[in-house]
Amino acid sequence: MRKVLLNISAMLLLISFSALDLSAQIETPAPSPSSELKQAVGLTDVTIVYSRPAVKGREIFAEDG
């Protein structure tokens, strides 16, 4: 009986620590942030949904020369 109680308490302890670990995850921004643009043109609503890549120190548009 004592061994069963010890096993159950050990499992409950492990489950509680794993739940704490899942809630501690840091949410970082998306690598390609998305954006949305809405505009009313006359009687029509125009929506543009796009995403742009992050530059991260790279040269996207090379200079002529």
Image (spheres, helix red, strand yellow):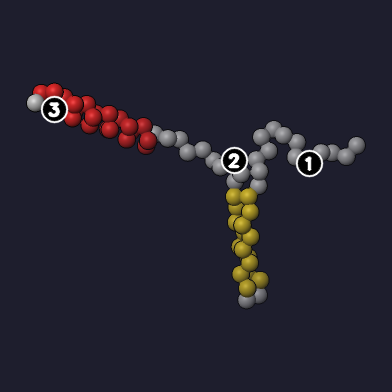
Question: How far from the left and from the top, in percent, is residue 31?
Answer: 59, 40
| Relative to 63, 49 lies left or right | left
Question: How far from the left and from the top, in percent, is residue 55?
Answer: 68, 38
Q: Marks 2 and 3: in contact by CB < 8 Å?
A: no
Residue drawn at (27%, 29%), measured in percent from left and top?
14
Q: CA distance from mark 3 to mark 2?
A: 48 Å
Q: Residues within 10 Å of mark 3 (few under 14, many from 20)?
A: few
Between disc 1 and disc 2, whose residue precedes? 2
| Figure check: 10 above or below 30 | above
- The kind of residue tagged 2 is Pro
The numbered dot on residue 61 is: 1
In the rendered image, the quadrant that contains the N terminus is: top left
Q: Residue furthest right?
A: 65
Q: CA distance from mark 1 to mark 3?
A: 66 Å
The numbered dot on residue 31 is: 2
Dot 3 corresponds to which residue?
5
Residue drawn at (22%, 31%), measured in percent from left and top?
12
Q: Residue furthest bottom?
A: 43
Residue drawn at (62%, 76%), measured in percent from left and top?
43
Question: How far from the left and from the top, in percent, is residue 7?
Answer: 19, 26
The numbered dot on residue 13 is: none
| Relative to 6, 16 lies left or right | right
Name the residue nearer the viewer: 4 or 19: 4
